[in-house]
Image (cartoon, rainbow, N blue to C red):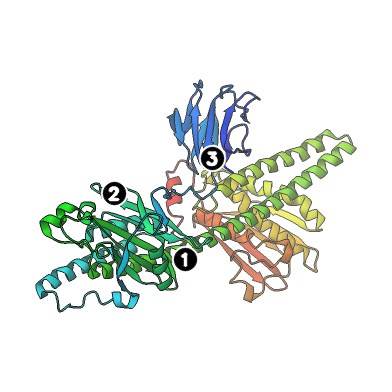
Amino acid sequence: MPSLFVIRGNDQGSRFEFAEGTTSIGRDASNDIQLHDTEVSRRHAQIYGSKDVYTVSDLDSSNGTFVNGRPVEAHRLESGDHLQIGRTLMLFTQPPGAPEVDLSDKVAISSDKAFGDQSHIVHSVSHEESSHFFELSPQVEQSAWLARARGNLQAMYRAALAVSQTLDIDKLLHRIMELIFESVEADRGCVMLTDADTGRLQPKVQRTRRNSKDGDRITISETILDYVMENGEGVLTSDAQQDDRWNPAASIVRMGIREAICVPMRGRYDIVGVIYIDTSTSPQELMLKGVANRFSEDHLKLMVAIAHQAALAVEDTRYYSAMVQAERLAAVGQTIATLSHHIKNILQGIRGGSYLIEMGLSEHDETVVRKGWKIVEKNQNKISALVLDMLTFSKEREPDLQPADINRVVCDVVELMQAHAADLDVAVHCRLADDIPTLVFDPEGMHRAILNVITNAIDAAADSERSGNVEVATAYLPEDGKIQVSIRDDGPGIPADEMEALFRPFVSSKKSRGTGLGLPVSQKILSEHGGRIAVESYPGKGSCFSLELPAVAPGTGREATSQTTIEEP
């Protein structure tokens, strides 16, 4: 079901799903989608959906409707478009699977008797025989054979070139049909692929020359299709030799002669479809040239070879699409796990704030209540920011660089994790350097990176047989041009054989308590800043994680430079 996700505005974080039909958007409560935005008109816009096509229309609103930053009166929405109404910015998403073009009214499969089709198979050629279409025939002069062989070779080369340049099956099949029409004098043609679920042939591409007297509808003999699919052989058919009244005055001349070629698209493993072309010889051609047939065995062999190339490309494209789909599913799983991991950390902070609120209410201490509520409110905002980050999780993310205080970020994280540490009987000590100036970095990103590492340190210290301590320290290293945040714990340490897999996704030493994404995400955030995470660990003594990032002073013009050097480490 399509949806609008609010990424900016008073309704930030809300998701509105809607179905086909008309969906109204506005400030008034009577709308299907109500936006709490004073710059949105009471009835601002509407979205009309039919057959997976959705169009947004402005309803003469005061401030207009914008799609991807441009004002629109009516605009067809595509998945990923940004829809702005007032100060509210929403992301339009639509499930994959655009409707396919139905060619059933253009290509029909029918029995021979139903349409009076008197065509019969004149020649057939197997897949092995088609590879010999360059061999010299004794009935053809050498010069004519060379010219025909050169043309066939050029057609095959262009077909192989088309196959190698696209992974879009529809574009590939259209290109193949264009090449066939350039190489063979056909009037009509189509490509049909086997449906994976039903096993039936479905037309995918249909082409007709403009001067075709039979129109753009193609009727294909079911008998011929069955023969091609069952035997895996290409066939050349004609209705001329069926008629015994072969003379210029006969009805066959008045009607013209229908010829057709149908070849299987045989790949490495199976037949994926068929290519069909046909033509009609007009009475004028018969009388002027005295030539009845426009298709020959050489055309049939060429068609079989081209169909084989197309079939290999279809198989490769389907295999590639399956791999991409598997990677997408894996990315979805990784995104969900990452989201759950971060929300778990944030919920721990909310739980700590709730505990303070409950304690303040029971003791009638407003100061404690306000302190607890401030923690809860801060983490609610972080959940909203986290959801927004997940929207672009699969892309390379540029940090939101701004002047900030790294000590303030560290204090926020420590304050957030105090309740969790107390539950595990772990003491968190903070030692901050007072000479760190205001620097340019992404405070939200660094908050998340430090939070993940401190959470791991607290869990490690809780497993220690000693008292359980975590020390968080900051340092300014102007000679190296960087700042450092070190988190040291006195836990059991990290075995040497686990160090190599430390930053590998989904690898966790905390078993069911961890998702194996905390450290990889932290490393990604530091890499985006042009920094790194250094690790020192001694089994039985503890571990130290040092988060290092460039010290960029505000107003130095290095903000953009720090973004362009992200890929260098």
Pointer 3 local density, CA inside 10 Å: few below 14, some 14–19, many at least 20: many
**Residue to which mark 2 is pinned:** 214
**Residue to which mark 1 is pinned:** 319
Amino acid under disc 3: Leu
- Helix, strand or loop under label 3: strand
**Residue to which mark 3 is pinned:** 91
Quarter of the image for the N terminus: give it: top right
Verify CB contact (< 8 Å) between mark 1 and mark 2. Answer: no
Q: Which sits in the foreground, 514 or 148?
A: 148
Q: Which sits in the foreground, 278 or 563?
A: 278
* For marks 1 and 2 on the same chain, the one whose residue lies earlier in the sequence: 2
Q: Residue at x 29, y 50 (%)?
A: 208
> Which labelled disc corresponds to residue 512?
none
Position of residue 315 in the picture relative to residue 482 (left or right): left
- Observer-side mark, 1 or 2, equals 2
* For marks 1 and 3 on the same chain, the one whose residue lies earlier in the sequence: 3
- Helix, strand or loop under label 1: helix
Work out whether 66 lies above or below 511.
above
Q: Residue at x 13, y 55 (%)?
A: 287
Amino acid under disc 2: Asp
Q: Residue at x 44, y 27 (%)?
A: 73
* For marks 2 and 3 on the same chain, the one whose residue lies earlier in the sequence: 3
Residue 436 visible within the image? no
Question: Where is residue 272 drawn, in percent x and y?
Answer: 43, 66
Amino acid under disc 1: Tyr
Residue 423 visible within the image? yes
- Observer-side mark, 1 or 3, equals 1
Residue at the extreme right: 363
Verify CB contact (< 8 Å) between mark 2 and mark 3. Answer: no
Q: Which sits in the foreground, 166 or 416?
A: 166
Q: Residue at x 40, y 64 (%)?
A: 223
Residue 354, by quadrant, is: top right
